[in-house]
Amino acid sequence: MRALVAGGAGFVGSHLCEFLLDQSIDVACVDNLSTGRRRNISHLLNRKGFRFVKADIAGRMNLRGEFDIIYNLASPASPKDYLALPLATLSVGSAGTRNLLELARRRKAVFVMASTSEVYGDPKQHPQRETYWGNVNPVGIRAVYDEAKRFSEALTVTYHRQYGMPVRIARIFNTYGPRMQTQDGRVVPNLIDQALNDQPMTIYGSGRQTRSFCYVSDLVEGLFRLAGCTDPMPVNLGNPDEYSILRLARVIRRLTGTRSKLQFRSLPQDDPKRRKPDITRARRLLKWKPKVPLEQGLEQTIAWFRKTRR
Ligand SMILES: NC(=O)c1ccc[n+]([C@@H]2O[C@H](COP(=O)([O-])OP(=O)(O)OC[C@H]3O[C@@H](n4cnc5c(N)ncnc54)[C@H](O)[C@@H]3O)[C@@H](O)[C@H]2O)c1
């Protein structure tokens, strides 16, 4: 089997490349390194069956070889990154997704789109089911990401309807783990980095807004199983255990043994108040549910952050 992983030098993508190689699947990792890092995949470069191609999926890609599965994870993903790269984010979610769909059509490959829980916006339904259409502000600052992903989903199902192509859509909820960037503004690396440096830990708003946090190994297993199912409609992948940001910060304080105090700041525009996946479809279709409890995942993530800051 041969897979292409677009965005494979990023946080999730690098774990997915590793997982696929471990299943004896050859991997072509395509990435423009805009938000990913070569060091995320440096340990894979000499592995049999792995190749790295530096390319922008929204531009001209000269990709050799056959593929059985194409995963599209390419996109700036953290608010800090997509706000710094607004047009590139819209472009990768439109032209980029279309280019990969065309490639999948020519190669007769299964296409797996990494979408996001952000398609639900600030949800009026809780927990979020795949049948919920969302509450997104199309002209808000986060629209570059949310609407790009919504458009990618629309393109993906249209290729299925028009050409009968095998497609899958994962709506990924907050995922964390080793290789996240400390400065990317996402809550888990942000709080861990501040805690390890004994700096004030930033809480936006009251901290009572909730999120669910999925450990990266669980997500990667879900993405792998998704490629093997036959349903073209979106499937939520995330951990349904709901934590307030305040509770998350307290757990990180305890696990790091930091002296940091909590520092409250105003909530960013269009920040969702609650997020929790309904994973009934993933359980049924993929026989999948997350296995790693938050504390265990945080311990592994903190250990990685400690090691890499030396
Ligand atoms: N991590 C999460 O919690 C989460 C949640 C929901 C959805 N997702 C989705 O999963 C995917 C991976 O997220 P991540 O957290 O690993 O982010 P990341 O920024 O670490 O990885 C994204 C990768 O895509 C690459 N990329 C961006 N634009 C590209 C382009 N035009 N051509 C080629 N490569 C390009 C980047 O260089 C980077 O390596 C993203 O599509 C994201 O939207 C992630």
Image (tube, rainbow, N blue to C red):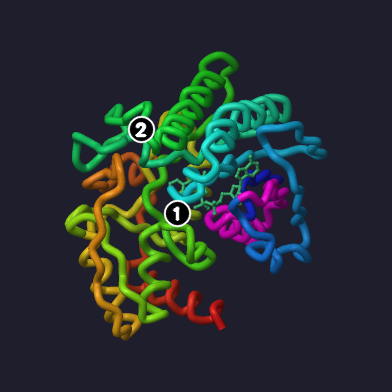
Q: Is residue 277 above or below residue 231?
A: below
Residue receiving disc 2: 140
20 sits to left or right of 300: right
Local SS, label 2: loop
Q: Was residue 21 drawn as part of the magenta stretch in this picture?
A: yes
SS at mark 1 in the image? helix
How packed is label 1: few (under 14 Cα within 10 Å), some, or many (20 or more)? many
Identify the residue at image location x=65%, y=32%.
100
Identified by mark 1, the residue type is: Leu
Residue range in magenta is: 10-34
Pointer 1 residue: 219
- Quadrant in which residue 46 is drawn: bottom right
| Residue 130 painted magenta | no
Residue 176 on image: x %, y %: 42, 61
Q: Amino acid at mark 2?
A: Gly
Farthest-out residue, front: 266
Of residue 120 and residue 229, the one placed in the foreground of this image is 120
93 sits to left or right of 187: right
Give the mark, 2 or 1, whose residue is nearer the N terminus: 2
37 lies above or below 297: above
10 Å neighbourhood of mark 2: few (<14), some, or many (≥20)?
few
* 286 lies left or right of 100: left
CB at mark 1 closer than 8 A to ligand 1?
Answer: yes
Circle 2/circle 1 CB separation < 8 Å: no
- The residue positioned 73% from the left and 43% from the top of the image is 55
Extreme top residue here? 162
**On the picture, is 229 further left or further right than 72?**
left
Q: CA distance from mark 2 to mark 1?
A: 28 Å
Q: Which image quadrant is residue 17 in?
A: bottom right
